[in-house]
Image (cartoon, rainbow, N blue to C red):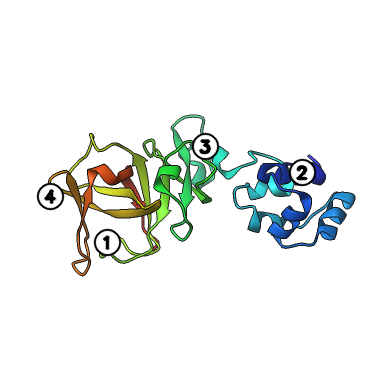
Amino acid sequence: MDKTTILNKIISYYNLKPADFASFIGVTPQVLTNWKRRNSYDPEKLYTKCIEFSPQWIISGDGPMLKSEYQDQDILISAEEDSGHYSTSNQIQIRNIPLYSPHTDNSLEEMLKKGSKKAIIDNFIRIPDLSKCDGAIYINDDSMQPLLKSGDVIVFKTTTTNNLSWGKMYLVEITENNHHSIFFGNLQKSALEGHIKLTKENPLHKSTDISLAKIKAIAIVISYIKSD
């Protein structure tokens, strides 16, 4: 795929006029015109600003166009691959798990929607033989220390309030006044009727009682990755 075609597909995705797209990525309209005329562009400039797109696709036009399209592309590799040997048996399944950043305005509800364009994927992680999951996200506070700390990654799977397991870790999103808030912690029964409680490992952090009626999305944590 030539560079002009790739560029046109990106502009079409955002449904912007060329001048507005140029402003969006931080170049002048003349630079954009020159890119098209020369059938070339600055790929780093594009994948830094157009974060929904796969960097590999921006560079070469190969593979899925959007990062979200990698989610269902599970692969099989040999369990002996790391040792430099190839085997057609004893294969393990590795899933492409979308990794989201807590520093963006990502909504848990959108993360749990298959193919959502509103949830921004930072990258993908691969964990051998992990059960089906919906995504992963960085922890950005110390509320779950010493078990987990800022920089660790939790892997989650969608569930419902009718299928809860006390003592397990959960991500819970509530919406109030058109603003969403995501809470994370160990699920416990609440003394308040119609509520659940999320407790923290760190005794310096208070537990949170959450009204079931306000829950917009809920996911159970099925695994985690420590940063060191």
Mark 1 or mark 3, which has the lower sequence index? Answer: 3
Circle 1 Cα neighbour tier, 10 Å, few/some/many (<14 / 14–19 / ≥20) = many
Along the line of sight, the residue nearer the viewer: 62 or 180: 180
| Above/below status of 92 relative to 51 | above
Tell me the distance, in whole angstroms, between the alpha carbons under discs 3 and 4: 36 Å
Judging by the rendered image, the residue that carries numbered circle 2 is 8
Which mark, by number, is residue 144?
1
- Nearer the viewer's eye, disc 4 or disc 1? 4
Mark 1 or mark 2, which has the lower sequence index? Answer: 2
Relative image position of residue 223 (x, y in whole percent) = 33, 47
Along the line of sight, the residue nearer the viewer: 225 or 123: 123
- Nearer the viewer's eye, disc 4 or disc 2? 4
Tell me the distance, in whole angstroms, between the alpha carbons under discs 4 and 2: 55 Å
Q: Is residue 81 visible?
A: yes
Q: Secondary structure at mark 3?
A: loop
Mark 4 or mark 1, which has the lower sequence index? Answer: 1
Relative image position of residue 221 (x, y in whole percent) = 31, 46
Judging by the rendered image, the residue that carries numbered circle 3 is 115
Q: Is residue 42 left or right of residue 120?
A: right
Tell me the distance, in whole angstroms, between the alpha carbons under discs 4 and 1: 23 Å
Give amino acid for label 3. Gly
Mark 3 or mark 4, which has the lower sequence index? Answer: 3
